[in-house]
Structure formats: C-alpha cells, structure tokens
C-alpha cells in the first residue's frame, strides 16, 4: 500500500484505512502498540500534537513504514494551488 500523506489528517486517514483493512479495532491496535484506544482515535482524526514515536509504534504494528522523499515540482504545485 503506497500512499502519500502530507498532513496529520492524511496520516490519520492512512492509518485508519490500514487498520480497517486488517480487521482491527482501535482498541486492538492500541493494545498491540502499547497505547490507549483514545490515542489511536486522536491519531486517526489528525491530531497534530501526536509524537513521531507514537506514530512509528502504530505504523510498526500495521507493518507500514515511514519514508521521506523529495517533492516533485508537479506535486508541490498541486498542494500549493487548490483545484477549482
């Protein structure tokens, strides 16, 4: 599953989709990551104050990885100018 996420909300949506694809509840994911269900809910809702360490723990349980890459000019323009 390759997805592009550039905001906390997009990261949360990606995590939610991956969790549901695996048939896990927020409580189950939280248990496996050593977090509370409420924390998983905050992450999935795009809480910008979530620590990177917490995100990485959730991604590990979901067998996902965090990658950093340069933005292409085309994708950077798409973010800067909303489509009408």
Image (tube, helix red, strand yellow):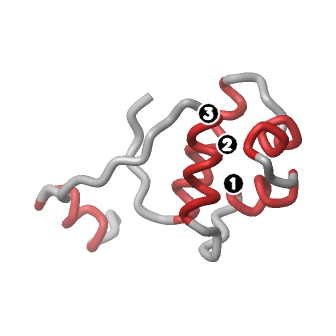
* CB-based contact (under 8 Å), mark 2 and mark 1: yes
Q: Is residue 70 above or below residue 17?
A: below
Rendering quarter of residue 65: top left
| Distance between the alpha carbons at the discs numbered 2 and 3 | 10 Å
* Pair 1/3: label in front: 3
Task: From the top left corner, tell me how far across and down residue 11 is, in percent.
Answer: 53, 54
Q: Left or right? Give the position of 51 relative to 1.
A: right
What residue is shown with label 2? 16
Please tell me whether mark 3 sits on a helix, a strand or a loop. Answer: loop
Rendering quarter of residue 50: bottom right
Task: From the top left corner, tell me how far across and down residue 42 is, in percent.
Answer: 75, 63
Quadrant containing the C terminus in the rendered view: bottom left
Please tell me whether mark 2 sits on a helix, a strand or a loop. Answer: helix
Q: Left or right? Give the position of 73 relative to 19.
A: left
Q: Residue at (42%, 47%) from the top-left corner?
A: 66
Q: Is residue 55 above or below residue 82?
A: above
What residue is shown with label 3? 62
* Pair 2/3: label in front: 3
Q: Earlier in the sequence, mark 1 or mark 3?
A: 1
Please tell me whether mark 1 sits on a helix, a strand or a loop. Answer: helix
Q: Residue at (43%, 53%) from the top-left corner?
A: 5
* CB-based contact (under 8 Å), mark 1 and mark 3: no
Residue nearest the viewer, comparing 84 with 32: 32
Label 2 neighbour load within 10 Å: few <14, some 14-19, many 20+: many
Task: From the top left corner, tell me how far across and down residue 70 is, in percent.
Answer: 18, 57
What residue is shown with label 1? 44
């Amino acid at each position: 599953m390759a997805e592009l996420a550039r905001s906390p909300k997009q990261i949360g949506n990606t995590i939610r989709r991956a969790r549901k694809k695996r048939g896990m509840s927020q409580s189950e994911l939280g248990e496996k990551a050593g977090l509370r269900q409420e924390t998983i809910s905050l992450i999935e809702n795009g809480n910008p104050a979530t620590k990177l360490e917490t995100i990485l723990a959730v991604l590990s349980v979901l067998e996902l990885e965090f990658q950093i890459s340069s933005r292409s000019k085309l994708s950077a323009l798409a973010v800067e100018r909303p489509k009408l």
